[in-house]
Each structure stands twice: as C-alpha cells, then as structure tokens.
Image (cartoon, rainbow, N blue to C red):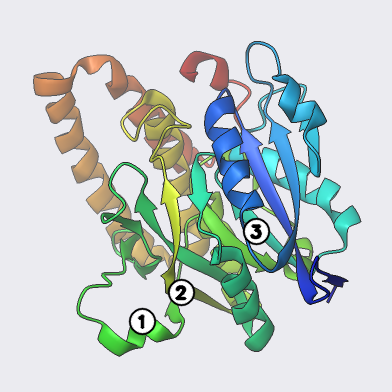
C-alpha cells in the first residue's frame, strides 16, 4: 500500500481516480472540484477525453495534479477507462476508483471506501450508494442481484434495512458509475470489456471479480450524486437502447446456462415486442430499428462499435 504524508503530518492512502469525458466539460470540472474536496486521502486523478467535438478547455491541460489525455477516437466508457487505468499505473496506487464524470462525491466517500477495502481482504469491489443529483433524496442505485431468467440485476432496496446499513452489503453487481477496485485485481482481470463500448461492461467486470473468489459490496451510507444518463443522452436514446440490448444478450452467454438463456430470450423477445408497440403509439418509431438491431446483433454475438457509432451519436 502506498502511504504518503499529509499536510498535517498524518499518513494518507493513495487512490487512483479515473474519469472519462465526452463533451461534458462543465460537469467534469464540477466532478473534479468535488474530488479535490476529499479528505484524508491522497487522490491522483486521470482524465480521458473520448475525442469530444470542439476544443479542449484550458483548465484540462493546466490544472494542478490532473493527468489528461485526449483520445484520437471515441472508445466508449470501457475503452476510455482502460486507457486511463493504464496511465494511472504510474501512481502505484493500491486502489482505483472509477467515477462517472457527471457524478460528484462527498468529502468522506473515497476515504471510507478505501478503508473498507483495506479492512476486508476478500472484498474485490466496493461502491457507494448513488443518488440523483437533481433529487439527492432519491436513490438511483445501490447495487443489485441477478435475476437469471430476466438477465437483469434487481436493485437493492435500502428502506427498512435498519442497522444492517452500517456494514457492507454483498451484491452481484454495482454500477460503473462509481466503484472502487483493487488495482492488481483489475489488471489481472484485464479491465473492462472494450468491445461492449458502453453498458454491461460493469456487469461483466463484476462477474469476473466474483469468479476470482472476491465479493462485491455496497456501503449504503457512502454517497455519490449522479446526473443520470447525461452521457448517453438518456436511457431511451438510440445509443443507450442499442448497446444495452445488444450487450445484455451477449453477456447472457457467459452468465446463464443454456436452458436459462432460452427462458431469458423468450422473455426478452416478448418485452421488445411490447416496447416496439409503445414506441409506435406514443414515443415515435425512430428508435425501433435500433432496439431490434441490438437484439439481432446480440443473438449473433456481434460486438464492437465502429460500424454503428457514427449513426448513433
């Protein structure tokens, strides 16, 4: 573990923080401001810009303590975070915190996540509870557990848990919006699955961590505030619908038995038929080709993004 002397002579744990931006410079700046307010931890921030349109603001290249790289193409959530992780290895930090650039942390969040990993050797990933930035009392996500026949992670409900909230809750999945992982474990696994581009690469990561014999835990009293789906244009945008549908089906090959995958595909087909009718009647037909392309690409096991990304963004 890397320990450094703090301003008052104390010892601080070092944490690498990875941020990926695409055209959200102001939200990114606010995210970094919140990180800079973190207490009692030595944070090293790496910011990757995924080839955003327009110019790079001057602060991205000149801000003290910020490592910055602009990618030559948009490599998505997975590719951007992997690139940032490789750069951050120079920091020699034992723990790495992946954080959405449209999220903000509270001053004690990173310290307490780090302490939990330090005190629990078989915890591979730890995450805070994530709340809506627009409504800080509204829970967006606190991890989830896999419902196999739906190939869906049902979100943990924190209401009514009482004293159990004082310790980590074991789950099957936490969102890549905000998660801290052991740096050597992330390296061993091989990082996020880049051919997914975005959506379900965090579920794939969690699957691999559990396969290595580690647990995934949520600390319900630790908080991150999230500007939900600002990076993809909303959960019903074409890019969100395509990649979420496709990657969910692709990942089901690794997570479900053949018989359970058959049940899931029957369920998924019925859901998409209802969704198609909903778009036709109320929300416009322009999204329909993309949900079905995601469906059929998923069935065929087609991944990557170069053939579709220019049409989706």
CB of mark 1 within 8 Å of CB of mark 2?
Answer: no
Residue labelled with disc 1 = 165
Viewer can see residue 303: no
Viewer can see residue 263: yes
Residue labelled with disc 3 = 97
Task: From the top left corner, tell me how far across and down residue 54 is, in percent.
Answer: 65, 10
Residue at x 31% of width, y 31% of height: 236
Extreme front residue here? 8
Quote the CA–CA distance across marks 3 and 2: 14 Å
Left or right of 164 on screen, residue 297 = right
CB of mark 3 within 8 Å of CB of mark 1?
Answer: no
Residue labelled with disc 2 = 219
Whether 183 is drawn above or below 103: the answer is below
Q: Earlier in the sequence, mark 3 or mark 2?
A: 3
Residue at x 14% of width, y 37% of height: 274
Task: From the top left corner, tell me how far across and down residue 79 is, in percent.
Answer: 69, 39
Quote the CA–CA distance across marks 1 and 2: 7 Å
* SS at circle 1: helix
* SS at circle 2: strand
Q: Earlier in the sequence, mark 1 or mark 2?
A: 1
Whether 198 is drawn above or below 184: the answer is above
| Label 2 crowd (10 A; few <14 / some 14-19 / many >=20) | many
Give residue 162's quadrant in the image.
bottom left
| Label 1 crowd (10 A; few <14 / some 14-19 / many >=20) | some
Residue at x 69% of width, y 12% of height: 55
Task: From the top left corner, tell me how far across and down residue 244 is, in percent.
Answer: 42, 41
């Amino acid at each position: 573990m890397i320990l450094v002397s703090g301003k008052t002579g104390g010892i601080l744990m070092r944490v690498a923080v990875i941020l990926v931006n695409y055209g959200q410079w102001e939200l990114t700046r606010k995210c970094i401001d919140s990180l800079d307010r973190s207490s009692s931890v030595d944070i090293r921030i790496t910011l990757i810009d995924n080839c955003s349109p327009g110019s790079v603001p001057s602060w991205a290249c000149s801000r003290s303590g910020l490592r910055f790289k602009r990618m030559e193409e948009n490599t998505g959530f997975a590719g951007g975070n992997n690139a940032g992780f490789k750069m951050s290895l120079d920091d020699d930090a034992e723990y790495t915190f992946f954080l959405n650039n449209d999220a903000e942390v509270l001053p004690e969040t990173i310290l307490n996540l780090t302490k939990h990993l330090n005190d629990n050797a078989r915890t591979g990933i730890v995450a805070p509870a994530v709340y809506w930035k627009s409504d800080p009392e509204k829970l967006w996500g606190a991890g989830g557990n896999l419902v196999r026949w739906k190939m869906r992670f049902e979100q943990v409900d924190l209401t009514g848990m009482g004293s159990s909230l004082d310790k980590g809750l074991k789950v099957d999945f936490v969102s890549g919006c905000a998660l801290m992982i052991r740096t050597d474990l992330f390296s061993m696994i091989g990082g996020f699955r880049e051919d997914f581009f975005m959506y379900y690469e965090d579920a794939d990561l969690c699957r691999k961590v559990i396969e290595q014999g580690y647990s995934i835990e949520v600390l319900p009293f630790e908080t991150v505030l999230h500007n939900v789906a600002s990076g993809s244009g909303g959960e019903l945008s074409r890019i969100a619908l395509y990649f979420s549908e496709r990657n969910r089906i692709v990942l089901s090959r690794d997570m479900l038995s053949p018989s359970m995958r058959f049940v899931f595909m029957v369920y998924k087909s019925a859901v998409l038929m209802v969704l198609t009718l909903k778009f036709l009647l109320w929300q416009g037909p322009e999204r329909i080709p993309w949900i079905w392309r995601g469906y059929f690409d998923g069935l065929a096991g087609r991944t990557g993004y170069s053939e579709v990304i220019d049409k989706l963004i």
